[in-house]
Amino acid sequence: MDKNKLDYKKLGFKCGIEIHQQIDGLKLFCKCPTLNSTKEPDIKIERRLRASAGEMGKVDIAAQHEMQKGKKIFYQGNSEDVCLVELDEQPPFPINQDALKIALQVALLLNAKIVDEIQIMRKTVVDGSNTSGFQRTSLIASDGYIETTKGKIKIPVICLEEEACQKVKEDKSSTTYKLDRLGIPLIEIATDADIKDSEHAKEVATHIGMILRSVDGMKRGIGTIRQDVNISIKCGARTEIKGFQELKSIPKVIEFEVNRQLSLIKKKEEMKETVRKAEPDCTTSFLRPMPGADRMYVETDVSPIKITKQLLSTIKKPELLTEKAIKLEKKHSLSPEIAKQIIKNGINLDSYTNKYKNLSPITIANILIELPKEIKTRLKLETSSLKESDFKETLELVNQNKIPKSAAIDILAAKAKGEKININKFQGISDEQLEKSINKLISEKPNLTIGAYMGLLMQEYRGKVDGKKAMEILKKLVK
């Protein structure tokens, strides 16, 4: 079957997404900062882990699978963001109240019902990613939903849990983990199997990502948000896919997995519920059997938390990024896309318009958002080195009329290349001088089109004249 022509409804396609988002500040059960230390490790330990039985006295199948590998586990970290709690040598502190409040804000934006009491649970994990052999997790809200272009998506579970260690290297006999990530507060959002197809899965993940970015206090950057996708088809087996590198890969990975299962069904091969990894080429590979309820049991070192009216009164529902963008668009007459980018990048446009009063909001937004894109695409320069101070210096030069607006791209391009800026090179000419130059050009080269004259002017005065002003004069003088 052509993967681009999958009939998801006919296939009995079921799909749900789990999204995990890190929270900034302090770790969930200690006072260590969530800074992901880059210092040389001054803590190194070795462990072997074994699986504990769950509440019903059974050992989880996924935990057994990991334990049977018999690997040594090595941990390393720096004491600036690792303490005895991460090493499982000290009981956990009470739960981080700031992280809890942030998670509850997310629950409100997801239209969920907050629980009356939070009970911390232990989830057995013996692959070494937790020094204790379990992950602390807690249900904070349920029965939420979001609206999408293809209907309502139910969100039955919202949890607050601790992040796991980061794997550094692995071989047949051992695995090495870095401890800095262990214990960072992590929000887990799980949708119901309401997703209709592969593109719908991407839409759902994008929408929930927008909601998470609407709440202050979230960590940003690579690895701070992750998506897992659960899928199944008729006669197939439920599969959890982990490790998506970016949202745009979600449809391709889902399509691959559906076709993989269809191939196994056709060959009449037995399928079991498994956890698989999303590979960079959008294929999937086996990780372990699907875990079950046997891995959960009650945490006895952290007391349950009552959700009181007093606590709830301190939780304010944030404004969504989409709502902020619409307001910004209307206030400053911006295009919808630029308004979205301003909000997405966390730019306070009002602070710029208050400071650079001679510039319109559209001009400021263009310099901040559009010029870096143009430098990257047209001039083939990397713009990641540009700092906020570079944009402020450029805006100040335009605001004081020391350079024309058209020279802003040249200033930023020079800064991106690490070059020294020679302002004299970009100093503009007056409107009177510009009109004299245009008259001279017309007399020397008569009967050209306005576009041709404009090209010659820009060739001579690029970065020194305002293109809009030059076009106004040309239209007045060229008959």
Image (cartoon, rainbow, N blue to C red):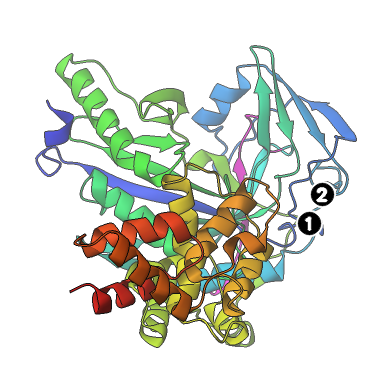
Asked whether 166 or 128 is in front, the reply is 166
Residue visible at 24% across and 31% down? Answer: 258
Residue 270 versus residue 80 in the image, above or below: above
User: Label 1 near label 2: C-beta < 8 Å?
Assistant: yes
Of residue 363 and residue 280, the one placed in the foreground of this image is: 363
Is residue 148 highlighted in magenta?
Answer: no
Residue at horizontal 59 percent and vertical 68 percent from the top: 427
Question: Identity of the amino acid at label 2?
Answer: Asp
Question: In the rendering, which numbered label is found on residue 81?
Answer: 2
Three-letter amino acid code at disc 1? Answer: Pro
Q: Is 372 placed above or below 324 here? A: above
Q: Quadrant location of residue 281?
A: top left
Rendered residue at 44%/71% (across/down): 466
Q: Give the extent of the magenta segment.
A: 116-130
Which quarter of the figure is the C terminus placed in?
A: bottom left
Q: Which circle marks residue 33 in the picture? A: 1
Q: Sequence-wise, which precedes: disc 2 or disc 1? A: 1
